[in-house]
Amino acid sequence: MSRLLLRGGRIVDPSQKLDQVWDLLIEDDRVEAVGKDLPQDSDTEVIELTGKVVAPGFVDMHVHLREPGYEYKETVASGTAAAAAGGFAGVACMPNTDPVNDNRAVTEMILDRAATEGSVPVYPIGAVSAGSKGEEMAEIGDLVDAGCVAVSDDGHPVATSFLMRRALEYTKMFGIPVIDHCEDMSLTARSSMHEGTASTRLGLKGHPSAAEEIIVARDVILAELTGGRLHCAHMSTAGSMRHLREAKQRGVAVTCEVTPHHFTLIDEAVSSFDTNTKVNPPLRGPEDREAVLAALGDGTVDVIASDHAPHHADEKNVEYDIALPGLIGLETAVPLACEHLVHTGVIDVSRLVELFSTNPCRIMGIAGGTLEAGAPANVTILDLDRQAAVDISTSRSKSRNSPFDGVLLRGWPAMTIVAGMVVWRSEA
Ligand code: DOR
């Protein structure tokens, strides 16, 4: 039996309403105890964590690992290494691979790769529809049986109201959420940025806020009709926040996530024509960013997820309107949240932990999100005072498509522990 004592850190665990400078004792792969001055014997390994935050392991519930099919952008091995280095003790991966994760064989292959080559656990998200084509429903029961924790046609919306209704009804049997990429594609064809004054000035075709909000409204109505669980991915507009706040007040079973790029950047960033600012949904207007910050503060937002979307340089070093959308986010999500949310007073540390750990685990029904005795010993340790610039050249990802290279941020992950093992530790 191995024992690891994390001594003298600030333990922040909203699942137990805990925020104390205490110790955490791990025995093998489980939390043994949290408390003041926990005893240690001679064979206990001790890590001193004075001044650090000790939290239940962060889980990024929106990641594109690209395997199978796009291994030149990312693999399970490289993506989970980036996750560990970003302070994440687990990731959920989206099904827009090639082939699409719409059947047991693909799910099992991803889980097998994760078991043999992964730095952190991987929770596959299966497709809602066969091939994510929006026609026939995928074999959702089989996907859940193989290990999928949710379904989504991410990259695309669930194509029709009929399919969304059936998916919400059917997933109720398995207690999993339907995660939707909310975009009315009839309004966004050939668009490459947010529709507003900046798109007009830059001469790029715009993606209106209404494209997102129409599908959010549709999905909320169908979640209410069916009683199914809806999770809205990468919410980016003021109108979406309004719909979601109101739906939650009415008791609809809806949760949502926002990304660090939507709470830090606005459409003006596109003026540089840096294709790393091209993302879907696009960077929105200043009033949208303000609304996202307000919704993070008032509890409307449940989760921060990176939407880590690696692309090869050749897919980005092209004209803006033909570049692929997406940016890598696993190693910058936590420092961006510390700098722009915690140090600015938008949220406190306990809410940060809720957004990165408690809530994603609860929504996906996975173990973790707590440091209660008996829980898996998955731990994220933060140094809220460390100040450093993002250096994308050191990323563990296979791709480099980040608009944050060189940006100075305060508050970084210091260590990631999975099942009692230190899987990553900052050299700083
Ligand atoms: O920017 C994005 N990239 N948004 C998505 O919805 C999909 C993702 C990808 O897979 O590249």
Image (cartoon, rainbow, N blue to C red):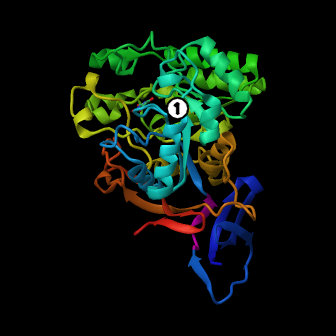
Q: Which element carries disc 1, helix, strand or loop?
A: loop
Residue 268 or 23: which is nearer the viewer?
Answer: 23
Residue 365 or 289: which is nearer the viewer?
Answer: 365
- Magenta segment: does it hold 71? no
Q: Give residue 6's quadrant in the image.
A: bottom right
Q: Name the residue under label 1.
A: 234
Residue 243 or 316: which is nearer the viewer?
Answer: 316
Task: Decide: is 11 above or below 199.
Answer: below
Amino acid type shown at disc 1: His
Q: Give residue 363's quadrant in the image.
A: top right
Dividing the image into 4 quarters, which one contains the N terminus? bottom right
Of all residues shown, which one is farthest toward the front? 105
Q: What stretch is highlighted in magenta?
A: 49-56
**Quadrant of picture, ligand 1:** top left
Say if residue 107 shows up in the picture: yes
Q: Residue at the spot x=72%, y=25% of the render?
A: 228
Q: Residue at the spot x=78%, y=23% of the render?
A: 250
Q: Give residue 224's quadrant in the image.
A: top right
Say if residue 348 shows up in the picture: no
> Left or right: 287 with respect to 37?
left
Task: Decide: is 377 above or below 398.
Answer: below
Q: Is label 1's Cβ within 8 Å of ligand 1? A: yes
> Left or right: 28 with respect to 273?
right
Of all residues shown, which one is farthest toward the bottom? 42
Q: Where is residue 163 in the image (x, y as percent from the top left)?
A: 60, 16
Dividing the image into 4 quarters, which one contains the C terminus? bottom left
Task: Decide: is 285 above or below 38.
Answer: above
